[in-house]
Image: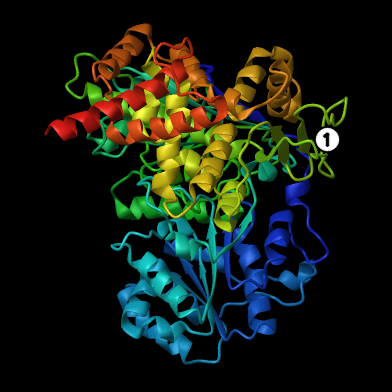
Amino acid sequence: MHETIPSVSVPYACSGKSTSSNELGMRPMQERAWEKRGEQYLLIKSPPASGKSRALMFIALDKLHNQGLRQAIVVVPERPIGASFDDAPLSEFGFWADWSVPPRWNLCNAPGTDGGKVNSVKAFLDSDDHILVCTHATFRFAVDRFGAGAFDGRLIAVDEFHHVSANPDNRLGEHVGQIIARDKSHIVAMTGSYFRGDAEPVLMPDDEAKFETVTYTYYEQLNGYEHLKQLDIGYFFYTGNYADDILRVLDPNEKTIVHIPNVNSRESTKDKIREVEHIIEELGEWQGADPATGFQLVKTPKGRILRIADLVDDDPGRRERVAAALRDSERMNNRDNVDIIVALGMAKEGFDWVWCDHALTVGYRSSLTEIVQIIGRATRDAPGKTRARFTNLIAEPDASEEAVTEAVNDTLKAIAASLLMEQVLAPRFNFTPKKPESGPVEGTDYGEEGYDPEKCNVGFNHNTGQFHIEIKGLTAPKGKDAERICREDLNEVIAAFAQDKTAVERGLFDEELVPEELTQVRMGKIVKDRYPDLSEEDREAVRQHAIAALNLTQKAKEKALDDLEAQTNGSTALIDGVRKFAMDVRDLDIDLIDRINPFGEAYAILAKTMSEESLKQVAAVITAKKIQLTPEEARDLARRALRFKHERGRLPSITSQDAWEQRMAEGVAFLVRMKAEAVDG
């Protein structure tokens, strides 16, 4: 039996809501997007399997029939994903039109190169036909050749929008920017993940502000499933060759996608074919290959025959036969068609296998987007599937390795990814400052005793999957941009913070850490760098909202893990955890939230997961780098010291018993010294 890995475990209610349809045949996410169909620029942020492609069909048909647009061009990252936009008989389910793409205009199915298909795009633009589907690459070549003006008066729908970047070297991002600058087309952008592993923004802030956002959260999606009740996310450390340890986490009874490491990564043995053979040998005795599908047949020690799809095979003929068997809808509707899929670069984005119980990934993935996509492979709803999990198998740092620092970095990044995924999977937080005139929000459940006007309240709307949380001293956003960020983009801010190496290192291993140095100074810097055009007050509002969301999720998880009874409470474990924390502290205030180390719970899990010797070694590598105060951090501390003076009538004291007050005083002293040294020359 596989080992239980310390991880976040999020239970869901199985309400069936996210899979039910209205009279037009729309599921809840599609209905939400449909309400915004009149927007010129629309961004749909919604998890895998929530129905983004069909949402686009509804909106595109309305834009073509009722909003005066001439044509719709659907742009997908890879040719296989074009199948998501094949003909769909929408009228059978209540809509007033069907989605139909003439075969000649689905360029994902056309032979030849992307560059060669550009003439087909021109022929379509000159035709009276309405819908074209092509790849990102074909679209880029077409804009390069014909200019952005050729697409005026049309809808451009960009699937997997996270492939776009504001980086000048990203051609798709540049072309989207040109089309927005002309302001004569409509854009619908769709993504299951708006994070970029390289921490670059997807759009420039000015362009992003033009988009109306429709957000459908992972929590809403999974909570509304019929069958899937629980999702576990964790990491597991191994020593030596990962294939020797893989059966400790790979349960042959679970339908599993195994992603082996990139050949350039530390975890790779540099022989990917041998790695697959080794995994097969660990699972049992090879019985040959199925001639119809190409699947490897392996007999387990208990006598069961496993069907394993090998997508790592270098022989293009064999690999294509396996891939074709996985694409065959009739076969894939059969749960017993395949048991384990082993892949390297395939079976991620846009790959549908509803029966997948376990996404097992070997080696750290640097891109948060890639992690979200891989987890999405396991979060499909299917009969008989009540639990899904994602496991990241990571090499333990080894003192004898030259690359010990690299190993430590991978460990820290895995923790950061885990923290972020907890945030992505949690219900959405809506924070409001606690004021005398505060009152309950309609449709929100405030617990057995109801809303209490005398204290900070924590409420939960079971229909929308959203918290309403009152916090004393919370700064509310004033400007429209700050309001949008607090409402839609807190996870992007948290992603930048969780990927900040200094913050993670100090949060996990600095025993002298004053939490406010992370929650106020580091998070403050991240918000300032990310949103330089916001006012200081709005930046502080964004900072407070982001740190409150992160820390309340961590505290809720801690409470849920502490309370074994909560483990059996179904979908309410995390909700109860937030309520318990709020009750324990009597009143939530922003100073209290700032005094929580966001990485405290992650360290507790790390200590259970990693061997004591390796943990000491990681700590030694990090503490060897003594962190010095930078002038920028000192200036931030001095600004906070002035705020302290305004509130208390005195400057912070360097001899104070309060560690944060002492740290602010050190920041002021640092600046005084720096100025004195500059004068002395």
Check disc 1: other Cα within 10 Å, few if <14, some if 14-19, many if 20+.
some
Which of 300 and 347 lies nearest the eye of the viewer?
347
Which of 649 and 415 lies nearest the eye of the viewer?
649
Which of 482 and 76 lies nearest the eye of the viewer?
482
Q: Please give left or right for residue 662 compared with residue 438 in the image.
A: left
- Residue 41 % position (x, y): 56, 69
Residue located at (47% from left, 59% from top):
161
Q: Please give left or right for residue 150 compared with residue 218 in the image.
A: left
Q: Please give left or right for residue 165 compared with residue 83 in the image.
A: left
Residue denoted by label 1: 445
Q: Residue furthest left?
A: 681
Residue located at (63% from left, 86% from top):
68
- Residue 482 % position (x, y): 56, 51
Task: State the colouring used for the structure image.
Answer: rainbow
Q: Is residue 301 visible?
A: no
> Tag 1, which secondary structure?
loop
Q: Residue furthest top?
A: 612
Q: Is residue 23 above or below residue 19?
A: below
Q: Is residue 78 above or below residue 253?
A: below
Q: Is residue 221 visible?
A: yes
Q: Is residue 355 above or below residue 53?
A: above
- Residue 87 % position (x, y): 62, 72
Residue located at (68% from left, 83% from top):
65
- Residue 118 % position (x, y): 36, 80
Which of 150 and 5 lies nearest the eye of the viewer?
150
- Look at label 1 and name its amino acid: Asp
User: The C terminus appears in which quarter of the rendering?
Assistant: top left
Residue located at (59% from left, 73% from top):
40
